[in-house]
Image (spheres, grey):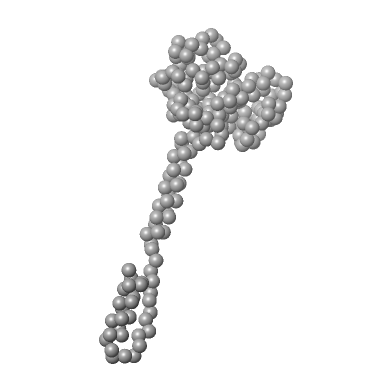
Amino acid sequence: MAQAKLPYVTAYGNIKKTLDKIQAASTPERFTHDFHATKLGMTGGSARPVVPFFKRIGFIGSDGTPTDLYKQFRGTDAQRGAAAAEGLRRGYRPLYEINEYAHELDEPALKALIVQVTGEEKKSNTVNLIAKSFQALNSFANHDAVAEDDAADEDDEGRGDEQTRLGKTALGLNYTINLQLPATSDIGVFNAIFKSLREHLLA
């Protein structure tokens, strides 16, 4: 298997600080280093790697434009948790390809998985930084919540199921009633039979 390059920030504490700050700040047209420093107050060289990290997890586009995932993160608690979970799966896809519950691993197991995916040495500082960056993002994640794109897909499926149910209902039921009429010339007998049908079966 080809060795993967996983995103990390050396000063990984800046991931959580930035994510806390963007919840209160308005969404910019471009999430640049200048916006990060001036509007969010994340100054210094140690904060600069957060921008490329956000690109790797799908929060901002290659040109710095905030994505729908970024905007979703700024929503309700459920939306924020779902967006963070989706960001983990996008940024650390190679981990999830091996273990779909990578976010539930304790730190030693997570580092072992990172070593397997990256080919780095077990005691490498890079492995530690990747694990810490993963955990920083994971602290915001709710893996039981559904990202908006997935929710839309589920809604479409639900509507399809509902239409199927309605379609089946619209078919209805058809009955065929066979009558064995008595051999009689008395019209009153026939009138009584059809009157009973109208009252009890055709109402």
Residue positioned 38% across, 71% down in the render: 175
Res 69 seen here: no
The x, y position of residue 152, in whole percent, is: 44, 39
Residue positioned 31% across, 90% down in the render: 184
Residue 25 vs residue 125: left or right?
left
The x, y position of residue 25, in whole percent, is: 44, 18
Residue 87 vs residue 198: left or right?
right
The x, y position of residue 159, in whole percent, is: 42, 47
Q: Nearer the viewer, residue 56 or 5?
A: 56
Is 172 rendered above or below residue 176?
above
Residue positioned 33% across, 75% down in the render: 197
Res 196 quadrant in image? bottom left
Q: Nearer the viewer, residue 196 or 168?
A: 196
Q: Quadrant of the N terminus?
A: top right
Is 29 rendered above or below residue 172?
above
Residue positioned 54% across, 13% down in the render: 47
Q: Nearer the viewer, residue 140 or 122?
A: 140
Q: Quadrant of the C terminus?
A: bottom left
Residue 146 vs residue 2: left or right?
left
Given the current orientation, which residue lies at the most extreme left position?
Answer: 187
The x, y position of residue 199, in whole percent, is: 32, 72
Q: How many marks?
A: 0
Res 8 quadrant in image? top right
Res 144 seen here: yes
